[in-house]
Image (cartoon, grey):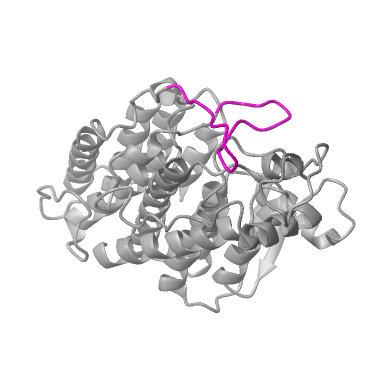
């Protein structure tokens, strides 16, 4: 938990890593290293990637600390002082012994091998320049700032568990000229407008809540609360975090693979161009503005739908579908009867904020479920 919080703190600095590197990769590396360090000593679970020799008596808690430290120090060298301080604080509470030294060695070996393994995963590749489309349905940068899209090549990054980013690529969405698309877009047009008269106060609050912080941070903080309230052992805690963050990382890769395979425009573009008559069921509004600024990437599938569904599926596998949870973001807390309720609100919030259609969200939900189930069967 301490190292998970440390990473969230590091990522609060927008200059901590290149803007082309998706943060879920860092969470996966951190938690996979801790998991393999512990598994190398306890042998209670199969390792994710590496089992290193562990002398008898090696301390698993020390190994987890050292592995976490070494991963974050390698990923964020400018944050080395803070990471070193975190390790010093953790290890100073443990008396010196042969078991402590052995644990340090195990953790360092796992981190070193895992960082080496992922050094050629394609995450450092500079994405090619994006060329916006001009046909109906083609993605193009969105107002008001019209930023160029992000993570346009992330779908080509080597997954952590999946065989490829396209393994669970959803089917192509309905054509933007179809009745199904018109129905979905008109729902966003009414509920997601900045001046909507049909969106409820609670829907507005939910839209802002789920947009206040990166959704992977939110779900990692949910996991922090769960392992605390359930008094999880070290072995259980590292398994929860590893499965969660490997699922989130591979969902992000699969999601961006699909986004840039289909290049679907965002609702704000579709609504503002409605008067070009690409769909008879849509009445254009050139001044339409969403409740919240649109994220700079294609619309299909929806990120909140995919990532929140992956997280909810993973955590329900450990704690059950009807486990009551509280979710806190930027000092605001919302309560849910189960993980699925939270995930469903997360993707609905993107309709209420004018970001996505139900078509985007349904594809995201399907993708997140498939990835999480696949990771669970391999870890």
Residue at point 88%, 47% (across, down): 195
Q: Position of residue 78 (x, y in %)?
A: 43, 20
Left or right? Give the position of 307 relative to 181. left
Q: Work out whether 336 lies above or below 153.
A: below
Of residues 364 and 118, the one drawn nearer to the viewer in this rendering: 364
Q: Is residue 167 visible?
A: yes
Question: Residue at coordinates 35% horizontally, 65% vertically from top-left?
Answer: 236
Q: Within the image, what quadrant is residue 167 found in?
A: bottom left
Q: What secondary structure prevails in the magenta region?
A: loop
The quadrant of the image that shows the C terminus is: bottom left
Dividing the picture into quadrants, the one containing residue 104 is: top left
Q: Nearer the viewer, residue 36 or 258?
A: 258
- Between residue 349 and residue 277, name the one nearer to us: 277
The answer to whether any part of residue 223 appears in the image is no
Give whichever of 290, 277 is nearer the camera.
277
Residue in the image at 35% along x and 67% along y: 373
Could you tell me residue 55's position as x and y percent?
Answer: 10, 50
Query: How far across and how far down the image is residue 138, in percent?
Result: 55, 39
Q: Is residue 23 one of those drawn in magenta?
A: no
Write the residue at 18% across / 51% down.
Answer: 58
| Left or right of residue 77, residue 180 in this image | right
Residue 122 falls left or right of residue 263? left
Q: Is residue 136 magenta?
A: yes
Residue range in magenta is: 129-148
- The mark tally for this picture is 0
């Amino acid at each position: 938990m301490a190292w998970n919080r440390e990473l969230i703190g590091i990522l609060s600095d927008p200059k901590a890593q290149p803007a082309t590197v998706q943060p879920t990769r860092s969470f996966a590396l951190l938690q996979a290293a801790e998991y393999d360090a512990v598994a190398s000593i306890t042998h209670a679970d199969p390792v994710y990637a590496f089992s290193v020799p562990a002398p008898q008596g090696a301390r698993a808690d020390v190994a987890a600390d050292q592995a976490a430290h070494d991963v974050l120090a390698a990923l964020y060298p400018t944050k080395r002082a803070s990471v070193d301080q975190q390790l010093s604080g953790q290890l100073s509470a443990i008396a010196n012994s042969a078991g402590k030294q052995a644990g340090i060695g195990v953790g360092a070996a796992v981190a070193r091998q895992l960082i080496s393994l992922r050094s050629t995963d394609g995450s450092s590749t500079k994405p090619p320049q994006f060329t916006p489309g001009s046909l109906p349905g083609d993605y193009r940068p969105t107002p008001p700032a019209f930023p160029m899209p992000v993570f346009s090549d992330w779908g080509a990054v080597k997954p952590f568990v999946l065989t490829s980013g396209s393994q669970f690529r959803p089917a192509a969405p309905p054509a933007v000229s179809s009745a199904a698309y018109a129905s979905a877009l008109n729902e966003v047009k009414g509920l997601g407008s900045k001046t909507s008269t049909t969106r409820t106060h609670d829907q507005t609050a939910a839209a802002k809540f789920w947009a206040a912080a990166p959704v992977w941070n939110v779900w990692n903080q949910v996991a922090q609360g769960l392992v605390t309230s359930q008094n999880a052992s070290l072995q259980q805690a590292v398994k929860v975090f590893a499965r969660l963050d490997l699922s989130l990382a591979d969902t992000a890769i699969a999601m961006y693979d699909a986004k840039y395979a289909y290049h679907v425009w965002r609702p704000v573009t579709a609504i503002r161009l409605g008067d070009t008559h690409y769909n008879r069921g849509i009445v254009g509004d050139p001044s339409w503005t969403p409740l919240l600024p649109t994220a700079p990437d294609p619309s299909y599938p929806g990120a909140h739908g995919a990532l929140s569904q992956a997280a909810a599926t993973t955590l329900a596998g450990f704690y059950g579908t009807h486990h009551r949870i509280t979710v806190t973001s930027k000092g605001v807390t919302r309560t849910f009867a189960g993980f699925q309720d939270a995930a469903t609100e997360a993707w609905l919030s993107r309709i209420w904020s004018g970001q996505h259609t139900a078509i985007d969200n349904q594809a995201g939900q399907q993708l997140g479920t498939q990835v999480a189930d696949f990771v669970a069967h391999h870890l």
